Amino acid sequence: METLLVEKNGPISTIWLNRPDVRNAFNENVIEELTHIFSSLPEDPDTRVVILAGKGKVFSAGADLNWMRSMVNADQATNYQDSRKLADLLELIRTCPQVTVARVQGAALGGGMGLASVCDIVVAEEQAKFGFTEVKLGLIPAVISSFVIAKVGASWARRYFVTGELFTGSRAQQMGLVHELVTTEHLDETVQTMANNALLGGPSAIAESKKLLERVTATAPGDLLKDTAEWIAKIRISEEGQEGTAAFLEKRQAKWNPPS
Ligand code: COA
């Protein structure tokens, strides 16, 4: 890997964006390497939590503007294929069966917001800055828009997409993008706590919950009565459902729990 560092600690993998000199801006190589890793995760039962992080001062400054500029002479079809790779990557991360945690320090801007918004849990340091700065560069937050709006809603997106202004971690938390806002010294410890918490759930139950969220958030509650009842009917007789309930009733750890 040229642009990423991967650290494995048992069932927890940390993927570091590793271009600190350009504040972890991402170009086609970063997208390709992330795509390679996230494509393999559905077939990787040993990994249960994925932490997405950035080396250096900043989580991610979004799209690499040198890369974007270099596409000026490419035709529309090539520009489309190039942009589509980021869209496909964000969808891959969003639908990853493992629990994903974004660790945000310094800033998350533009596409960096896209990366954070497709993670299940976002932990940020208090002084981190956030923004959809695209309009200030004469661009638009196109590829990330659907992912961001699904996370924070159209109202906040509307405000910040049109102004491109930077905003604070507490505003990002108010929007629902950031879940835990902590001092710098507590950043790693909080990320670790989130990861450890995620190890207490049954891996299949977590993957199914993520699919359930997908189904439920796209449809009105009244249209889901049959589906959700069928879903739990299937899960409660599954091996994991039986093991988890038995473990609780027998006052023991479920077999997927890390040894204490
Ligand atoms: N693409 C390419 N290079 C970038 C970049 C990006 N998105 N963001 C930062 N860089 C580069 C800078 O050009 C600079 O390069 P240099 O050392 O050759 O001059 C280097 O990273 C450091 O940037 P700098 O602005 O000095 O760092 P900082 O720590 O003071 O500020 C940011 C960090 C992220 C706040 C600031 O770099 C920034 O606002 N970047 C633009 C982010 C943006 O608008 N992204 C949206 C893209 S659609």
Image: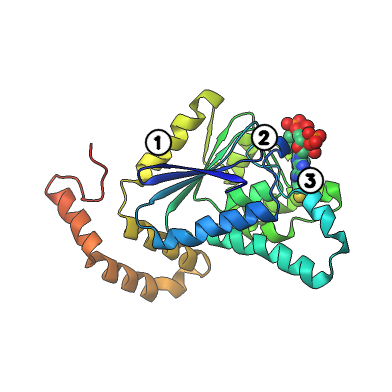
Residue 117 in picture, x, y percent from top left:
59, 51
Is the Cβ of the residue at disc 2 closer than 8 Å to that at disc 1? no
Is the Cβ of the residue at disc 2 closer than 8 Å to that at disc 3? no
Of labels 2 and 1, earlier in sequence is: 2
Mark 2, Cα crowd under 10 Å, few <14 / some 14-19 / many 20+, is: some
Q: List the residue tagged with mark 3.
A: 164
Residue 210 in picture, x, y percent from top left:
43, 60
Task: Look at the image and tell me whether residue 233 can be seen.
Answer: yes
Q: Would you say 242 lies left or right of 32 here? A: left
Question: What is the three-letter code of the residue carrying label 1?
Answer: Thr
Q: Would you say 182 lies left or right of 75 here? A: left
Residue at 60% of width from left, 58% of height from top? 90
Q: Establish if 189 lies above or below 2.
A: above
Q: List the residue tagged with mark 2.
A: 168
Q: Is mark 1 within 8 Å of ligand 1?
A: no
Q: CA distance from mark 2 to mark 3?
A: 13 Å
Question: What is the three-letter code of the residue carrying label 3?
Answer: Gly
Question: Which quadrant of the render holds ligand 1?
Answer: top right
Give the quarter of the image for residue 32.
bottom right
| SS at circle 1 | helix
Task: Look at the image and tell me whether residue 165 can be seen.
Answer: no
Residue at 51% of width from left, 30% of height from top? 187
Q: Would you say 187 lies left or right of 82 here? A: left
Q: CA distance from mark 2 to mark 1?
A: 23 Å
Residue 43 in picture, x, y percent from top left:
40, 63
Residue at 15% of width from left, 55% of height from top? 246
Q: Establish if 55 lies above or below 113.
A: above
| SS at circle 3 | loop
Give the residue at the far left of this rendering.
250
